[in-house]
Image: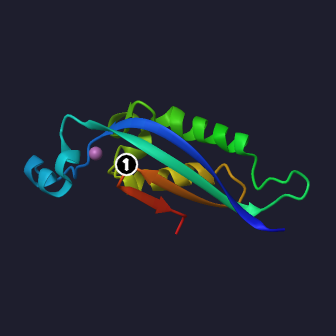
């Protein structure tokens, strides 16, 4: 069967602070700029989750997009939306919540819930012009 990629877009707002705990505020500011504000700040994150696999000959689906929508809601939006990532999300207690690391955490959470015959890829925008992709390498 043809291999096709299906995509689902999602969105969450979250606060973070980028910093290395062993560095001074000055050094953190030099490396991370405004994102190291000790009082935190927010971003509007735009997420695209892409799932690639063969079309199921019975359903015509690669993956039921309503199932993917619910997975993104329960695993990502409910966990991250309107949260302080550093303080409220366990994965970032000791992991700097850069857009790169957030994309990897999202990938790993979804990877655990989607059957392994499907390849997945995460595209995460931190700003309209800054975004990353992660496909599990
Ligand atoms: Ni930031």
| Observer-nearest of 82 and 129 | 129
Q: Is mark 1 within 8 Å of ligand 1?
A: yes
**Colouring convention used in this rendered image of the protein:** rainbow
Figure check: 88 above or below 35? above
One can see residue 118 in this view: no
State the residue position of label 1. Answer: 126
Q: Is residue 96 left or right of residue 32?
A: right
Image quadrant in which you'd find residue 91 = top left
One can see residue 42 in this view: yes
Q: Position of residue 54 (x, y in %)?
A: 78, 64
Q: Position of residue 98 (x, y in %)?
A: 34, 52
Q: Secondary structure at mark 1?
A: loop
| Residue found at x 50% / y 35% | 79
**What is the residue that sits farthest to the top in this orientation?**
82
| Residue found at x 76% / y 56% | 62
Q: Position of residue 65 (x, y in %)?
A: 71, 45
Image quadrant in which you'd find residue 17 = top left
| Residue found at x 54% / y 64% | 136
**What is the residue that sits farthest to the front in this orientation?**
128
Q: Is residue 93 left or right of residue 7?
A: left
How crowded pointer 1 is (Cα within 10 Å; few <14, some 14-19, many 20+) is rated as many
| Residue found at x 35% / y 55% | 130
Q: Is residue 94 left or right of residue 48?
A: left
């Amino acid at each position: 069967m043809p291999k096709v990629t299906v995509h689902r877009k999602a969105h969450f707002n979250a606060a973070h602070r980028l910093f290395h705990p062993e560095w001074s505020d000055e050094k953190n500011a030099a490396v991370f700029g405004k994102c190291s504000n000790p009082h935190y700040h927010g971003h509007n994150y735009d997420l695209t989750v892409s799932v690639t696999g063969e079309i199921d000959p019975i359903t015509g689906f690669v993956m039921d997009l309503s199932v993917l929508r619910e997975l993104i809601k329960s695993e990502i939006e409910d966990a991250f939306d309107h949260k302080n990532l550093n303080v409220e999300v366990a994965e970032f207690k000791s992991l700097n919540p850069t857009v790169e690391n957030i994309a990897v955490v999202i990938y790993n959470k979804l990877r655990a819930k989607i059957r392994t015959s499907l390849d997945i890829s995460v595209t995460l925008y931190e700003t309209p012009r800054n975004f990353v992709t992660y496909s599990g390498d």
